[in-house]
């Protein structure tokens, strides 16, 4: 693995300062920073070969189309599926889940049917299902969590019934960091022939994701959370589902033949890619995946584990600081609250020290309600962070505390 100085040098933004202090970026759960190679790849599209994909017969269109399809191939290999038809580009995790919620609802859902989610979900994996349930008269069922922020599997097993049509859960909680027991969730659902969607927004960047081994039916993630550009995401779906499901958007490129009387659709994966896709971002995403593979996903996992242990040790040593989310299995995210200090005050003061953390509900209001709190401060770490930065955060928190005594 490259050493940490080399890794950090790959990310131009990490060398900037904020309010005269070196930037310490601990908001990787919200979005990650981009290595130079990703910035260059996107720049190169616009500088050298920009042309709308799949449409032109001209040189630039051909080049862009080829690079876009190569990006699909990179994604296919990265998440390990044998079929390129199963890789759909979207605008992000939110776009992917909304798309499936709509299509699945249209195709399969009847009044009284049930969809199972967990109490840990991001709003992006709640609201689309709620909207679909309202349209179709279906019902959401929620797997409860314990005080450590882990889902209670026995309760999940009880929720599975002959009315369950789909289970949709996160790979890891963005609010607490908990990694969900996907193996158990998927195998229990499958033994009742129920498909499972995994929201991989907080999973893909932290270790190896192998959708075939995982055996999920759908998997969604966002490019910007794995060091790629904004505005691009992926929806993986098993071919048998994608074949049966209707498209969630209509427009150019997703069609075979259009008349005013009837339209027939394009083959997979294009059936689900209506209009001009964000091909420069897809090309940038492919470059980000190469970058991550170059660092090594096992290396990333190990390094982030080490950072998480160190940060947990440092932060839990601070009097009056409570960590929310204490599962044994976590991604490198620490959510906390300091006694009698509003999370926004903590976040704003840390910001003045050059430390970027997230404050609030993290788009996971039900998680906050579960603990009866308004929100937390969240430090989400990744492999380019350092123990020295964690020390600065711990000292910064002590300073915040001293300002409120
Ligand atoms: N799901 C989870 C678990 C997330 O953490 C996020 C974003 O933070 C999303 C979904 C939505 O991702 P995006 O806004 O990139 O669509």
Image (tube, grey):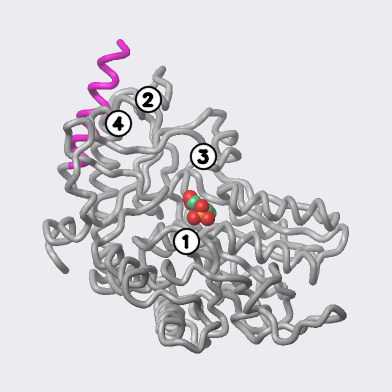
Q: CA distance from mark 3 to mark 4?
A: 30 Å
How packed is label 2: few (under 14 Cα within 10 Å), some, or many (20 or more)? some
The mark tally for this picture is 4
Distance Cα–Cα, label 1 vs label 2: 31 Å
For marks 4 and 1, the one nearer the N-term is 1
Q: Is residue 198 left or right of residue 156?
A: left
Q: Quadrant of the C terminus?
A: top left
Depth check, front residue: 303 or 322: 303
In the rendered structure, which disc, 1 or 2, sits on the residue that comes first in sequence? 1
Q: Position of residue 243 (x, y in %)?
A: 69, 83
What label sits on residue 139 in the rendered view? Answer: none
- Indicate which label's residue lies in the foreground, 3 or 4: 4
Question: Does the rendering let one see residue 173?
Answer: no
On the image, the x and y values in percent for residue 60 come to 41, 82
Q: Ligand 1: does it lie within 8 Å of the C-beta at label 1?
A: yes
Q: Is mark 3 within 8 Å of ligand 1?
A: no
Instruction: Give the residue pinned by disc 3.
Output: 147
């Amino acid at each position: 693995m490259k050493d940490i100085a080399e890794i950090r040098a790959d990310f131009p933004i990490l060398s900037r300062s904020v309010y005269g202090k070196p930037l310490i970026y601990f908001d990787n759960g919200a979005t990650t920073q981009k290595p130079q190679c990703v910035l260059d790849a996107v720049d190169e599209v616009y500088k050298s070969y920009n042309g709308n994909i799949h449409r032109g017969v001209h040189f630039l269109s051909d080049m862009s189309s080829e690079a876009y399809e190569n990006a699909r191939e990179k994604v296919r290999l990265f998440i390990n599926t044998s079929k390129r038809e199963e890789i759909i580009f979207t605008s992000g995790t939110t776009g992917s889940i909304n798309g499936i919620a709509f299509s699945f609802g249209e195709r399969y859902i009847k009044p009284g049917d049930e969809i199972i989610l967990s109490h840990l979900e991001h709003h992006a994996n709640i609201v689309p299902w709620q909207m679909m349930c309202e349209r179709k008269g279906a019902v959401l069922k929620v797997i409860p969590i314990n005080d450590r922020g882990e889902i209670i599997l026995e309760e999940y097993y009880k929720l599975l019934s002959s009315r369950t049509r789909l289970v949709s859960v996160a790979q890891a909680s963005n609010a607490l960091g908990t990694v969900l027991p996907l193996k158990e969730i998927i195998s229990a659902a499958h033994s009742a022939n129920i498909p499972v969607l995994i929201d991989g927004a907080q999973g893909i960047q932290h270790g190896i994701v192998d959708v075939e081994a995982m055996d999920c039916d759908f998997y969604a993630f966002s490019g910007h959370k794995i060091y790629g550009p904004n505005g691009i995401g992926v929806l993986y779906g098993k071919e048998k589902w994608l074949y049966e499901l209707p498209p969630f958007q209509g427009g150019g490129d997703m069609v075979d033949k259009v008349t005013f009387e009837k339209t027939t659709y394009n083959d997979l994966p294009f059936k689900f890619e209506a209009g001009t896709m964000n091909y420069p971002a897809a090309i940038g995403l492919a470059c980000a995946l190469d970058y991550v593979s170059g660092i090594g996903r096992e290396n990333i996992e190990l390094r982030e584990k080490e950072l998480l242990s160190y940060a947990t040790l440092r932060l839990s040593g601070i009097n009056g600081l409570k960590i929310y989310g204490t599962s044994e299995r976590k991604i490198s995210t620490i959510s906390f609250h300091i006694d009698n200090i509003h999370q926004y005050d903590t976040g704003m003061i840390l910001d003045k020290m050059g430390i970027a953390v997230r404050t609030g509900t993290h788009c996971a209001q039900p998680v906050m309600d579960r603990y009866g709190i308004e929100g937390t401060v969240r430090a989400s770490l990744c492999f380019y962070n350092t123990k020295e930065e964690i020390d600065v955060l711990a000292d910064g928190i002590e300073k915040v505390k001293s300002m409120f005594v």
